[in-house]
Image: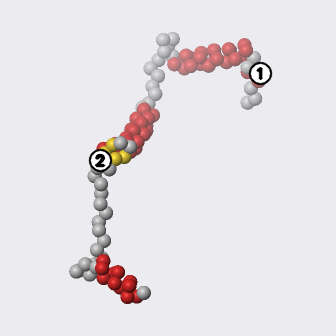
């Protein structure tokens, strides 16, 4: 058995002492889903890049919008505080008329 193993190894050896393994053959005409391999790879790469960059850009846009100060420049009725107080009073009066405030447990 040892001689058969050595003989098989001798058949695969080259003059430099290495094994004669062949490099894998790449088929450049291979198709993936009916597309050439290079086109399928390019599309897959583009989808991957866009899948990473679009959420990043949306997050950056949201952060930029959140950093902008919200400034109320006044209302047609005059003072902002009076306008906000009037709005809150209107909501509370409406809720009181419907009887919704009686059901609230604060």
Residue on which the image places disc 1 = 102
Mark 2 secondary-structure assignment? helix
Judging depth in this view, the residue of 9 and 104 nearest the camera is: 9
Q: Residue at x 30, y 57 (%)?
A: 26
- Is residue 41 depicted above or below 90 in this figure? below
Q: Where does residue 101 sit, x and y in percent of width and height?
A: 73, 21
In the rendered image, the quadrant that contains the C terminus is top right
Q: Where does residue 52 sit, x and y in percent of width and height?
A: 40, 44
Q: Residue at x 47, y 22 (%)?
A: 72
Q: Residue at x 34, y 47 (%)?
A: 31
Occupied quadrant, residue 87: top right
Q: Where does residue 45 sit, x and y in percent of width and height?
A: 34, 46
Occupied quadrant, residue 33: top left
Q: Where does residue 54 sit, x and y in percent of width and height?
A: 39, 38
Q: Residues within 10 Å of mark 2 (few under 14, many from 20)?
A: some
Q: Are marks 2 and 1 in contact (CB under 8 Å)?
A: no
Residue on which the image places disc 2 = 38
Mark 1 secondary-structure assignment? helix
The mark that comes first in sequence, 2 or 1, is: 2
């Amino acid at each position: 058995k040892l001689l058969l193993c050595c003989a098989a190894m001798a058949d695969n050896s080259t003059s430099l002492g290495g094994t004669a393994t062949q490099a894998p053959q790449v088929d450049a005409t291979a198709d993936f889903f009916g597309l050439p391999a290079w086109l399928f790879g390019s599309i897959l790469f583009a989808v991957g890049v866009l899948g990473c960059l679009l959420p990043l850009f949306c997050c950056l846009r949201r952060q930029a919008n959140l950093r902008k100060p919200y400034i109320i420049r006044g209302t047609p009725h005059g003072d902002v505080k009076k306008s906000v107080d009037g709005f809150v009073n209107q909501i509370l009066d409406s809720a009181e008329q419907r009887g919704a405030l009686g059901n609230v447990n604060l």
